[in-house]
Amino acid sequence: MTRLYLPRDSAALALGADALAQALTREAAQRGLTLDLVRNGSRGLFWLEPLLEVVTSAGRIGYANVELDDISTLFDAGFLTGNSHPRNVGLVDELPYLKRQQRLTFARIGLTDPLSLDDYLAHGGLAGLKQALAMDGADAIAALIESGLRGRGGAAFPAGIKWRTVRDAPAAQKYIVCNADEGDSGTFSDRLIMESDPFVLIEGMLIAALVTGATQGYIYVRSEYPHAIATLEAAIAQAHAAGWLGEQILGSAHRFTLQVAKGAGAYVCGEETALLESLEGKRGIVRAKPPVPALAGLHGQPTVINNVITLATVPLIFARGAAFYRDFGMGRSRGTLPFQLAGNVRHGGLVELAFGVTLRELMFDFGAGTANGRPVRAVQVGGPLGAYVPPEQWDLPLDYEAYSAVGAVVGHGGIVLHDDTANLADLAQYAMHFCALESCGKCTPCRIGSTRGVEVIAQIRRGDTSAKQVQLLRDLCDTMTAGSLCAMGGMTPYPVLSALEHYPEDFGLEPAASRAAAA
């Protein structure tokens, strides 16, 4: 019996993967053939979806962009043995886009059935948890700190320090909360993990619970991810039935329960304290800090809040050792990051590489430039609140500190390309408008500053390009950065100021005029 793999993630489903699965099964039955069709997770090569893979003696042969009209011709061509066909792209593992990556956190995605416990175990699953069960909690935290893992949600705070704070906090109840409210434009790495390898997230949260003493966990998922929610709930049910979750984790004295909580669609709930308010059944409004959630988080108790990629990376670190992970990356940015190529890009998808790769390499060696063939003009890195990175900075290493030094952010690893028809003044004005729409309204710099920002940029674009008006915009951005309670208002100036600095002509300004106002 021939085994086939056809993705079941959102991207493949949007392109008709379910209908293809039905057509494959129906065509095989009509020809008297029996197939073992596995609905795997996506490999992350979105420009090739739906990507149908056939297991052959040589490896998994891929057939890309498969449509319903291709089904009969695939069978006629003998695709079940990997024969030639216009959709054939060869051995998937040998595709340069995949072969040049350093997949650590994403090592399993696309290879396995996301809801198969046996598949998970066969590909190294639970090795990290078993190692953590054999370690003292303090030693486990020391290992996590040694690995250099920092939060992958954007703030890049050392994960081990956060865990240690929760472990050392005296409390009868502690929580592990996964922030899966992936709302940044052009990002999808969290979704890919949840839909393609949910057990690795569960294992990461289990390790966090063992180390810190937490007994209850929540995965807060944005409502726009129904397939991720369904997959997680099915995986959690299986993990409970297998004894991975519940009163005696893998037969130990530790207990941990886990459930999915669905967000209501507010972008600001990606901020950890607004998320906690929402999780408690309240309106998603940012909390003032201190106290930090590690000391007074969910229901006022010590809480670890990490995003999906952070928690999903933990099992590998415990399975392979802190030194193994630390040896990837550069400076204080250790390990790998899943970069997500989106926007006007020919080969959109996920690229996991060690910190230190450049934007130019990602855009052209992996992304193959723009989809329409026009020159790339600007690249927004780090989501809708990230800076626009100009060509002269495309060779900087992608590293938290290197980007911070030029007023940019790596953030969640989202990379959105814009071609030479993009108007950066328009995009800057939209950034302020987006902030005005999504602000929780608690602090004045964000609530009022974003509204005034839209007006000031509009005034400049209407022709008031005086130094006074440009300085007013810069002063407003400074107030938002310094005075906002959270990154919603504090980071909105990043796209605005980067556009003003590197693309002044779009505002009707001479380069010298823009820089003079900054002096």
Image: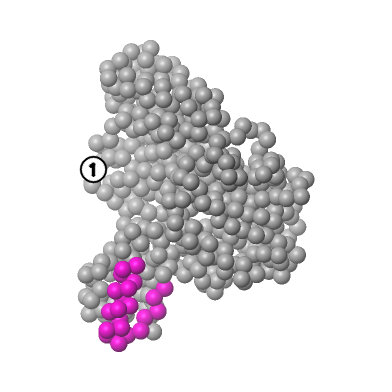
The residue that appears at 65% across and 69% down in the rendered structure is 243
Residue furthest to the bottom in view is: 32
Q: Is residue 417 left or right of residue 108?
A: left
The residue that appears at 49% across and 58% down in the rendered structure is 229
Image coords of residue 231 (percent x, y): 49, 62
**Three-letter code, disc 1:** Arg
Image coords of residue 224 (percent x, y): 43, 51
Q: Which residue is mark 1?
A: 374
* 469 in the magenta segment: no
Magenta region, main secondary structure: helix
Q: Residues within 10 Å of mark 1 (few under 14, many from 20)?
A: few
- Against 516, residue 103 (above or below) is below
- Against 306, residue 36 (above or below) is below
Q: How many marks?
A: 1
Quadrant of the image containing the C terminus: top left
- Against 113, residue 77 (above or below) is below
* 23 in the magenta segment: yes
Image coords of residue 86 (percent x, y): 22, 69
Q: Is residue 255 left or right of residue 92?
A: right
Question: Residue 316 lies in what quarter of the image?
Answer: bottom right
The residue that appears at 36% across and 58% down in the rendered structure is 11
Whether residue 286 is visible here, answered yes or no, is yes
In this orientation, which residue lies closer to the viewer: 337 or 416? 416
In this orientation, which residue lies closer to the viewer: 346 or 259? 259
- What range of the chain is rendered magenta? 18-38
Question: Residue 278 lies in what quarter of the image?
Answer: top right
Q: Is residue 58 left or right of residue 410?
A: left
